[in-house]
Amino acid sequence: MNIVVLAGGISTEREISIVSGTQVCKALREKGHRAILMDVYFGNVEIQPANAFPENYDTDAAAAYMRGFDGNIEAAKAAQKEFFGPKVLEICREADVVFLALHGENGENGKVQAAFDLLGIVYTGSGYLGSALAMDKALSKKLFREGGVPTPGGVTLHQGETVKSTAGYNVGLPCVVKPSCGGSSVGVFIAETEEAFQAAVAEAFSYESEIVVESYIKGREFSVGVVDGEAYPVIEIAPIEGFYDYKNKYQAGSTIETCPAEISAEQTARMQEYAVLAYNVLKLENYARVDFMMDDNGDMYCLEANTLPGMTPTSLLPQEAAALGMTFADLCEKLIQVSLKK
Protein backbone atom coordinates (compact mmCIF):
# COMPACT_ATOMS: atom_id res chain seq x y z
CA MET A 1 0.00 0.00 0.00
CA ASN A 2 0.93 3.65 -0.40
CA ILE A 3 1.10 5.05 3.14
CA VAL A 4 1.80 8.50 4.57
CA VAL A 5 3.20 8.41 8.10
CA LEU A 6 2.18 11.77 9.49
CA ALA A 7 4.28 13.12 12.35
CA GLY A 8 5.87 16.28 13.75
CA GLY A 9 3.52 19.21 14.21
CA ILE A 10 3.79 21.99 16.76
CA SER A 11 2.85 20.36 20.08
CA THR A 12 5.24 19.95 23.02
CA GLU A 13 5.59 16.32 21.88
CA ARG A 14 6.93 17.12 18.41
CA GLU A 15 10.25 15.30 18.86
CA ILE A 16 8.63 12.15 20.25
CA SER A 17 6.25 12.20 17.30
CA ILE A 18 9.15 12.35 14.85
CA VAL A 19 10.82 9.40 16.60
CA SER A 20 7.56 7.40 16.49
CA GLY A 21 6.96 8.29 12.85
CA THR A 22 10.49 7.36 11.81
CA GLN A 23 10.24 3.92 13.41
CA VAL A 24 6.76 3.26 12.01
CA CYS A 25 7.81 4.29 8.51
CA LYS A 26 10.81 1.96 8.61
CA ALA A 27 8.65 -0.91 9.91
CA LEU A 28 6.04 -0.44 7.20
CA ARG A 29 8.79 -0.37 4.58
CA GLU A 30 10.02 -3.69 5.99
CA LYS A 31 6.51 -5.04 5.40
CA GLY A 32 6.73 -4.09 1.73
CA HIS A 33 4.61 -0.93 1.86
CA ARG A 34 5.61 2.27 0.08
CA ALA A 35 5.54 4.42 3.20
CA ILE A 36 6.79 8.01 3.41
CA LEU A 37 7.28 10.33 6.38
CA MET A 38 5.76 13.83 6.38
CA ASP A 39 5.52 16.70 8.83
CA VAL A 40 1.86 17.62 9.26
CA TYR A 41 2.67 21.29 9.86
CA PHE A 42 5.64 22.00 7.58
CA GLY A 43 4.97 19.48 4.83
CA ASN A 44 7.50 19.00 2.04
CA VAL A 45 7.47 21.14 -1.09
CA GLU A 46 9.89 18.72 -2.79
CA ILE A 47 7.40 15.82 -2.91
CA GLN A 48 5.44 15.49 -6.13
CA PRO A 49 2.15 13.51 -6.22
CA ALA A 50 3.24 11.58 -9.32
CA ASN A 51 6.17 9.98 -7.47
CA ALA A 52 5.22 10.52 -3.84
CA PHE A 53 5.62 6.86 -2.90
CA PRO A 54 8.95 5.64 -4.33
CA GLU A 55 10.21 2.09 -4.13
CA ASN A 56 13.48 3.22 -2.54
CA TYR A 57 13.27 5.75 0.28
CA ASP A 58 15.59 7.23 2.93
CA THR A 59 13.46 7.52 6.09
CA ASP A 60 16.29 8.98 8.18
CA ALA A 61 16.79 11.73 5.60
CA ALA A 62 13.07 12.53 5.77
CA ALA A 63 13.28 12.74 9.57
CA ALA A 64 16.31 15.05 9.32
CA TYR A 65 14.36 17.27 6.90
CA MET A 66 11.56 17.52 9.48
CA ARG A 67 13.96 18.41 12.29
CA GLY A 68 15.31 21.20 10.14
CA PHE A 69 12.13 23.13 10.96
CA ASP A 70 12.49 22.79 14.74
CA GLY A 71 13.79 26.33 15.15
CA ASN A 72 10.98 27.83 13.04
CA ILE A 73 7.98 26.67 15.06
CA GLU A 74 7.33 29.79 17.12
CA ALA A 75 7.80 32.10 14.12
CA ALA A 76 5.42 29.98 12.04
CA LYS A 77 2.81 30.02 14.80
CA ALA A 78 3.16 33.79 15.21
CA ALA A 79 2.59 34.21 11.48
CA GLN A 80 -0.67 32.24 11.89
CA LYS A 81 0.35 29.79 9.21
CA GLU A 82 -2.42 27.36 8.31
CA PHE A 83 -2.05 24.02 10.07
CA PHE A 84 -1.53 21.59 7.20
CA GLY A 85 1.81 22.17 5.53
CA PRO A 86 2.63 22.28 1.80
CA LYS A 87 1.55 19.16 -0.10
CA VAL A 88 0.27 17.40 3.06
CA LEU A 89 -3.39 17.12 2.16
CA GLU A 90 -2.60 16.61 -1.50
CA ILE A 91 -0.30 13.65 -0.77
CA CYS A 92 -2.55 12.22 1.96
CA ARG A 93 -5.40 12.08 -0.57
CA GLU A 94 -3.17 9.94 -2.81
CA ALA A 95 -2.38 7.46 -0.02
CA ASP A 96 -4.30 4.27 0.71
CA VAL A 97 -4.12 5.13 4.41
CA VAL A 98 -2.45 7.71 6.64
CA PHE A 99 -0.70 6.35 9.73
CA LEU A 100 -1.07 9.02 12.41
CA ALA A 101 2.15 9.14 14.43
CA LEU A 102 1.18 12.52 15.86
CA HIS A 103 1.33 13.17 19.61
CA GLY A 104 -0.07 16.03 21.63
CA GLU A 105 -2.69 18.71 21.18
CA ASN A 106 -3.12 19.19 17.44
CA GLY A 107 -2.65 15.55 16.59
CA GLU A 108 -4.75 13.84 19.21
CA ASN A 109 -7.56 16.30 19.96
CA GLY A 110 -9.73 15.27 17.01
CA LYS A 111 -9.16 18.25 14.73
CA VAL A 112 -6.92 16.44 12.24
CA GLN A 113 -9.28 13.46 12.34
CA ALA A 114 -12.31 15.66 11.63
CA ALA A 115 -10.55 17.32 8.69
CA PHE A 116 -9.63 13.95 7.25
CA ASP A 117 -13.19 12.70 7.67
CA LEU A 118 -14.48 15.65 5.66
CA LEU A 119 -11.90 15.03 2.94
CA GLY A 120 -12.43 11.28 2.81
CA ILE A 121 -8.87 10.50 3.91
CA VAL A 122 -8.50 7.12 5.65
CA TYR A 123 -6.36 7.20 8.81
CA THR A 124 -5.33 5.06 11.76
CA GLY A 125 -6.64 5.40 15.30
CA SER A 126 -9.78 6.82 16.82
CA GLY A 127 -12.16 9.20 15.11
CA TYR A 128 -12.61 12.87 15.96
CA LEU A 129 -15.13 12.35 18.76
CA GLY A 130 -13.21 9.75 20.77
CA SER A 131 -9.97 11.66 20.21
CA ALA A 132 -11.50 14.87 21.57
CA LEU A 133 -13.06 13.15 24.58
CA ALA A 134 -9.86 11.36 25.57
CA MET A 135 -7.67 14.43 25.07
CA ASP A 136 -9.73 16.45 27.54
CA LYS A 137 -8.80 14.92 30.91
CA ALA A 138 -11.47 16.88 32.77
CA LEU A 139 -14.19 15.59 30.47
CA SER A 140 -12.83 12.04 30.30
CA LYS A 141 -12.74 11.83 34.11
CA LYS A 142 -16.39 12.85 34.22
CA LEU A 143 -17.26 10.18 31.66
CA PHE A 144 -15.22 7.61 33.60
CA ARG A 145 -17.23 8.31 36.75
CA GLU A 146 -20.54 8.15 34.90
CA GLY A 147 -19.51 4.97 33.08
CA GLY A 148 -18.32 3.03 36.12
CA VAL A 149 -14.57 3.35 35.48
CA PRO A 150 -12.79 4.07 38.80
CA THR A 151 -10.72 7.25 38.65
CA PRO A 152 -9.08 9.51 41.26
CA GLY A 153 -11.29 12.22 42.75
CA GLY A 154 -10.55 15.73 41.61
CA VAL A 155 -11.71 19.07 40.25
CA THR A 156 -11.25 21.19 37.14
CA LEU A 157 -9.91 24.74 37.52
CA HIS A 158 -10.10 27.56 34.99
CA GLN A 159 -7.65 30.39 34.61
CA GLY A 160 -8.78 33.58 36.31
CA GLU A 161 -10.80 32.01 39.11
CA THR A 162 -9.69 32.28 42.72
CA VAL A 163 -7.59 29.27 43.71
CA LYS A 164 -8.55 27.70 47.03
CA SER A 165 -6.46 25.48 49.27
CA THR A 166 -6.38 21.74 48.57
CA ALA A 167 -8.77 21.23 51.47
CA GLY A 168 -11.24 23.49 49.69
CA TYR A 169 -11.21 21.08 46.76
CA ASN A 170 -11.34 17.98 48.96
CA VAL A 171 -8.27 16.42 47.35
CA GLY A 172 -5.77 16.65 50.22
CA LEU A 173 -2.00 16.44 50.01
CA PRO A 174 -0.10 15.27 48.13
CA CYS A 175 -2.12 15.95 44.99
CA VAL A 176 -1.56 15.96 41.25
CA VAL A 177 -1.85 19.10 39.12
CA LYS A 178 -1.84 18.83 35.34
CA PRO A 179 -3.04 20.60 32.18
CA SER A 180 -6.38 19.25 31.02
CA CYS A 181 -5.29 18.57 27.44
CA GLY A 182 -1.55 17.98 27.70
CA GLY A 183 0.39 14.84 26.91
CA SER A 184 3.62 13.00 27.79
CA SER A 185 3.26 14.31 31.36
CA VAL A 186 4.36 17.79 30.24
CA GLY A 187 3.31 20.28 32.93
CA VAL A 188 2.34 17.58 35.45
CA PHE A 189 3.27 18.19 39.08
CA ILE A 190 2.92 16.30 42.35
CA ALA A 191 2.44 18.88 45.11
CA GLU A 192 3.23 17.83 48.68
CA THR A 193 2.65 21.19 50.40
CA GLU A 194 0.17 24.03 50.02
CA GLU A 195 2.95 26.28 48.76
CA ALA A 196 3.94 23.69 46.18
CA PHE A 197 0.29 23.30 45.18
CA GLN A 198 -0.14 27.02 44.51
CA ALA A 199 3.11 27.08 42.51
CA ALA A 200 2.06 23.99 40.53
CA VAL A 201 -1.29 25.56 39.67
CA ALA A 202 0.42 28.71 38.40
CA GLU A 203 2.87 26.66 36.33
CA ALA A 204 0.18 24.38 34.89
CA PHE A 205 -1.81 27.44 33.81
CA SER A 206 1.21 28.54 31.77
CA TYR A 207 0.45 25.56 29.50
CA GLU A 208 -3.34 25.78 29.31
CA SER A 209 -6.29 27.79 30.63
CA GLU A 210 -7.95 24.66 32.09
CA ILE A 211 -6.21 22.31 34.51
CA VAL A 212 -7.09 19.25 36.57
CA VAL A 213 -6.34 18.80 40.27
CA GLU A 214 -6.78 15.26 41.53
CA SER A 215 -6.00 13.10 44.52
CA TYR A 216 -2.58 11.48 44.45
CA ILE A 217 -2.74 7.69 44.36
CA LYS A 218 0.29 6.14 46.01
CA GLY A 219 1.07 2.76 44.52
CA ARG A 220 2.12 1.02 41.32
CA GLU A 221 1.55 2.34 37.80
CA PHE A 222 0.32 0.24 34.88
CA SER A 223 -0.83 0.58 31.30
CA VAL A 224 -3.06 -1.56 29.12
CA GLY A 225 -3.26 -1.40 25.36
CA VAL A 226 -6.62 -2.00 23.71
CA VAL A 227 -6.54 -2.98 20.04
CA ASP A 228 -9.78 -3.55 18.12
CA GLY A 229 -11.65 -3.77 21.43
CA GLU A 230 -9.30 -6.43 22.89
CA ALA A 231 -7.12 -5.76 25.94
CA TYR A 232 -3.41 -6.55 25.55
CA PRO A 233 -1.17 -7.77 28.40
CA VAL A 234 -0.78 -5.39 31.34
CA ILE A 235 2.59 -3.62 31.59
CA GLU A 236 3.93 -2.19 34.84
CA ILE A 237 5.87 1.09 34.77
CA ALA A 238 8.29 1.67 37.67
CA PRO A 239 10.41 4.85 37.42
CA ILE A 240 13.74 4.52 39.21
CA GLU A 241 13.30 8.06 40.59
CA GLY A 242 10.20 10.23 40.89
CA PHE A 243 7.07 9.55 38.83
CA TYR A 244 6.46 8.69 35.19
CA ASP A 245 7.18 12.19 33.87
CA TYR A 246 8.55 13.29 30.49
CA LYS A 247 12.16 12.40 31.38
CA ASN A 248 11.28 8.98 32.74
CA LYS A 249 9.13 8.22 29.70
CA TYR A 250 11.78 8.96 27.12
CA GLN A 251 15.24 8.76 28.73
CA ALA A 252 16.71 5.30 28.40
CA GLY A 253 17.29 3.49 31.70
CA SER A 254 15.03 5.79 33.73
CA THR A 255 12.17 3.31 34.10
CA ILE A 256 11.79 -0.41 34.71
CA GLU A 257 8.97 -1.80 32.57
CA THR A 258 7.65 -5.30 33.19
CA CYS A 259 5.33 -7.06 30.76
CA PRO A 260 3.30 -9.03 31.57
CA ALA A 261 3.01 -7.22 34.90
CA GLU A 262 3.64 -9.28 38.01
CA ILE A 263 0.14 -9.11 39.47
CA SER A 264 -2.46 -11.78 40.11
CA ALA A 265 -4.58 -13.25 37.34
CA GLU A 266 -7.64 -11.70 38.97
CA GLN A 267 -6.03 -8.25 39.09
CA THR A 268 -4.90 -8.60 35.48
CA ALA A 269 -8.39 -9.53 34.29
CA ARG A 270 -9.99 -6.70 36.28
CA MET A 271 -7.59 -4.07 34.96
CA GLN A 272 -8.09 -5.30 31.40
CA GLU A 273 -11.87 -5.13 31.87
CA TYR A 274 -11.58 -1.54 33.12
CA ALA A 275 -9.33 -0.69 30.14
CA VAL A 276 -11.89 -1.97 27.65
CA LEU A 277 -14.67 -0.20 29.56
CA ALA A 278 -12.73 3.09 29.46
CA TYR A 279 -12.10 2.55 25.73
CA ASN A 280 -15.83 2.11 25.13
CA VAL A 281 -16.93 4.93 27.45
CA LEU A 282 -14.75 7.38 25.52
CA LYS A 283 -16.01 6.02 22.17
CA LEU A 284 -12.51 5.08 21.07
CA GLU A 285 -11.81 3.08 17.94
CA ASN A 286 -9.12 0.77 16.60
CA TYR A 287 -6.50 1.18 19.32
CA ALA A 288 -5.54 3.14 22.41
CA ARG A 289 -3.57 2.80 25.64
CA VAL A 290 -5.19 3.21 29.05
CA ASP A 291 -3.16 4.15 32.14
CA PHE A 292 -3.82 3.05 35.73
CA MET A 293 -2.61 3.34 39.31
CA MET A 294 -3.14 0.56 41.85
CA ASP A 295 -2.78 1.31 45.56
CA ASP A 296 -1.55 -0.99 48.30
CA ASN A 297 -5.10 -2.31 48.85
CA GLY A 298 -5.34 -3.43 45.24
CA ASP A 299 -7.83 -0.70 44.32
CA MET A 300 -7.41 0.49 40.73
CA TYR A 301 -7.79 3.99 39.35
CA CYS A 302 -7.89 4.91 35.69
CA LEU A 303 -5.85 8.03 34.99
CA GLU A 304 -6.43 8.62 31.28
CA ALA A 305 -6.52 7.13 27.81
CA ASN A 306 -3.99 7.86 25.09
CA THR A 307 -5.44 7.61 21.58
CA LEU A 308 -2.12 7.79 19.69
CA PRO A 309 0.37 6.11 22.03
CA GLY A 310 4.10 6.23 21.43
CA MET A 311 5.24 3.94 18.63
CA THR A 312 8.91 3.21 19.03
CA PRO A 313 9.98 -0.43 19.51
CA THR A 314 10.50 0.26 23.24
CA SER A 315 7.21 2.13 23.75
CA LEU A 316 4.59 0.57 26.00
CA LEU A 317 2.09 -0.68 23.42
CA PRO A 318 4.79 -2.37 21.29
CA GLN A 319 6.13 -4.07 24.43
CA GLU A 320 2.65 -5.42 25.17
CA ALA A 321 2.36 -6.66 21.61
CA ALA A 322 5.77 -8.34 21.93
CA ALA A 323 4.45 -10.26 24.93
CA LEU A 324 1.88 -11.70 22.52
CA GLY A 325 4.61 -12.71 20.09
CA MET A 326 4.16 -9.79 17.70
CA THR A 327 7.10 -7.91 16.22
CA PHE A 328 7.02 -4.12 16.02
CA ALA A 329 6.40 -4.35 12.27
CA ASP A 330 3.58 -6.85 12.88
CA LEU A 331 1.95 -4.41 15.28
CA CYS A 332 2.21 -1.52 12.80
CA GLU A 333 0.61 -3.72 10.16
CA LYS A 334 -2.19 -4.76 12.52
CA LEU A 335 -2.98 -1.16 13.51
CA ILE A 336 -3.41 -0.35 9.82
CA GLN A 337 -5.60 -3.37 9.18
CA VAL A 338 -7.96 -2.74 12.13
CA SER A 339 -8.22 0.92 11.11
CA LEU A 340 -9.06 0.02 7.51
CA LYS A 341 -11.98 -2.09 8.74
CA LYS A 342 -13.87 1.03 9.79
Image: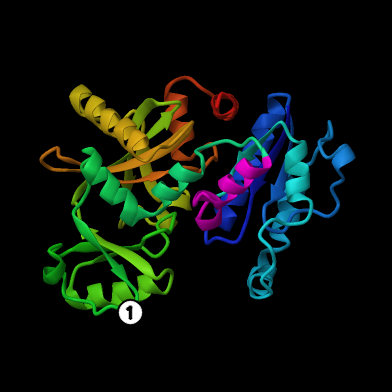
Going 22% across and 45% down the picture, which residue do you hit?
145
- Quarter the N terminus occupies: top right
Going 41% across and 58% down the picture, which residue do you hit?
181
Q: Quadrant of residue 289?
A: top left
Expressed as whole percent of the image width and height from the top left, the position of residue 241 reads: 31, 56
Label 1 Cα crowd, 10 Å radius (few <14 / some 14-19 / many 20+) = few
Going 71% across and 48% down the picture, which residue do you hit?
38
Q: Which secondary structure is most common in the magenta stretch?
A: helix
Q: Describe the element under mark 1 as helix, strand or loop.
A: loop
Compared with 279, 196 (above or below) is: below
Q: Is residue 4 left or right of residue 139?
A: right
Expressed as whole percent of the image width and height from the top left, the position of residue 28 reads: 67, 30
- Quarter the C terminus occupies: top right
Residue 302 visible in the current orientation: no
Residue that numbered label 1 is attached to: 160
Give the extent of the magenta segment: 103-119
Single out the residue that lies furthest toward the top.
325
Q: How is the image coloured?
A: rainbow
Expressed as whole percent of the image width and height from the top left, the position of residue 52 reads: 83, 40
**Type of the residue with mark 1:** Gly
Going 71% across and 31% down the picture, which residue do you hit?
96
Q: Nearer the viewer, residue 72 or 86?
A: 86
